[in-house]
């Protein structure tokens, strides 16, 4: 049994899939399956219930997974301490982000980080908000990027961005030519919005209730892309963060209208487990995230390690 075997088992347990774990670690699915089978034979107990899809851990598998995860974390901390002595930034950086963080914005961060630290392995996954939170809490992600991040005792919550909420309308809508409106003008509008249970839906409902505005909800989706598509075809209007509609503004498929008598913003935050020891690579990416992406295009951001040394 090797550390690589343990890492492979943890990946299978985390993703609940042999094929996904194999792709992540760059091995074949038979290798992943055989590795877990060998571990089970070595331990004398079944770790994974293969009759379920997605795969489920047995009680013994859950205990083993938690122990192996701690073992891997301890090894990474030790490895990181040694690498710091050589002033190298290497190792995995696991980031879970909601879909609407923005591919273009994150691509800027990812490219800059990979240029600065080519020996670090950045893994960025776009997920449902509940899955982002679950992965961070279960130590399956080092950092999480969320809107309206929850305040929980076991989490560190770092404010990241504040995005203005605007009204997105199709070009033919009666409000499309307006730059600003009073929020009361939304009364009676057909609204495309988020599904109940999402925090952003809870906040939008609260805002409208406080403003004494009644809208007619015609469609509910769990992601911004579907909301935008529904608005484009004329199903209704939507309250969305400005950065999420930039592409549609450029191609002319949507218009935005500002709300002049209210200030509604979507906060984005960076979360990680409170007592988690962040590796140097994770710290560097966290520092990078807190720089505006526009500064990379201007070329006036030095590597975080150099900025830290200069202070």
Image: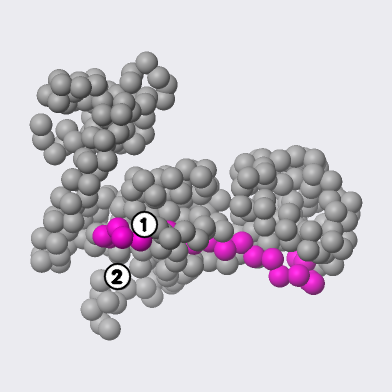
Between marks 2 and 1, how big is the CA–CA gap?
25 Å
Residue 24, disc: none
For the N terminus, which image quadrant? top left
Tell me the element at label 1. strand
Residue 226 image-quadrant placement? top right
Residue at the spot of label 2: 303
- Residue 32: percent from left, percent from top: 24, 26
Q: Does residue 22 appear anywhere in the picture?
A: no
Q: Residue at x 42, y 68 (%)?
A: 290
x and y, in percent, of residue 116 in the image: 28, 62
Q: Which residues are magenta?
A: 258-278
| Residue 140 versus residue 211 in the image, above or below | above
Which is more toward the observer, 258 or 69? Answer: 69
Residue 158, position as x, y percentages in the image: 44, 66
Disc 2 to disc 1: CB gap under 8 Å: no
Nearest the camera: 149 or 172?
Answer: 149
In the picture, residue 44 is in which quadrant? Answer: top left
Query: Residue 54's x, y, as percent?
Result: 41, 25
Residue 64 is left or right of residue 82, and the answer is right
Residue placed under numbered mark 1 in the picture: 273
Q: Residue furthest bottom?
A: 311
Q: Secondary structure at mark 2?
A: loop
| 231 relative to 103 in the view: left or right | right
Q: Nearer the viewer, residue 1 or 250?
A: 1
Image vertical order of residue 117 relative to residue 52, above or below: below
Up-down: is 260 above or below 16?
below
The quadrant in which residue 270 appears is: bottom left
Q: Which residue is located at x 30 percent, y 71 percent?
A: 304
Q: Nearer the viewer, residue 46 or 11?
A: 46
């Amino acid at each position: 049994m090797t550390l690589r075997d343990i890492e492979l088992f943890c990946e299978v347990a985390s993703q609940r899939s042999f094929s996904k774990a194999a792709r992540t670690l760059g091995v074949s699915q038979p290798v992943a399956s055989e590795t877990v089978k060998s571990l089970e034979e070595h331990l004398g107990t079944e770790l994974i219930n293969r009759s379920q899809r997605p795969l489920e851990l047995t009680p013994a598998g859950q205990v083993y997974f938690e122990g192996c995860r701690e073992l891997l974390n301890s090894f990474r901390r030790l490895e990181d301490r040694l690498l710091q002595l050589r002033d190298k930034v290497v190792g995995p950086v696991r980031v879970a982000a909601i879909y609407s963080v923005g591919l273009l914005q994150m691509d800027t961060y990812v490219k800059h980080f990979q240029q600065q630290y080519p020996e670090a392995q950045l893994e960025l996954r776009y997920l449902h908000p509940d899955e982002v939170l679950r992965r961070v809490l279960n130590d399956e992600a080092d950092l999480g990027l969320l809107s309206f991040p929850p305040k929980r005792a076991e989490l560190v919550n770092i404010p990241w961005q504040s995005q203005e909420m605007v009204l997105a309308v199709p070009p033919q809508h009666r409000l499309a030519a307006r730059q600003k409106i009073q929020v009361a003008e939304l009364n009676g509008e057909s609204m495309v919005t988020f599904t109940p249970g999402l925090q952003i839906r809870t906040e939008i409902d609260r805002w409208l209730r406080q403003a004494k505005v009644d809208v007619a909800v015609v469609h509910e989706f769990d992601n911004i892309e579907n909301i935008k598509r529904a608005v484009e075809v004329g199903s209704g209007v939507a309250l969305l963060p400005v950065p999420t509609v930039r592409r549609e503004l450029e191609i002319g498929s949507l218009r935005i209208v500002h709300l002049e008598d209210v200030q509604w913003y979507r906060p984005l935050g960076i979360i990680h487990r409170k007592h988690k020891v962040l590796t140097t690579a994770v710290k560097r990416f966290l520092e990078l995230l807190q720089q505006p992406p526009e500064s990379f295009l201007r070329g006036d951001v030095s590597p975080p390690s150099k900025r830290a040394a200069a202070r």
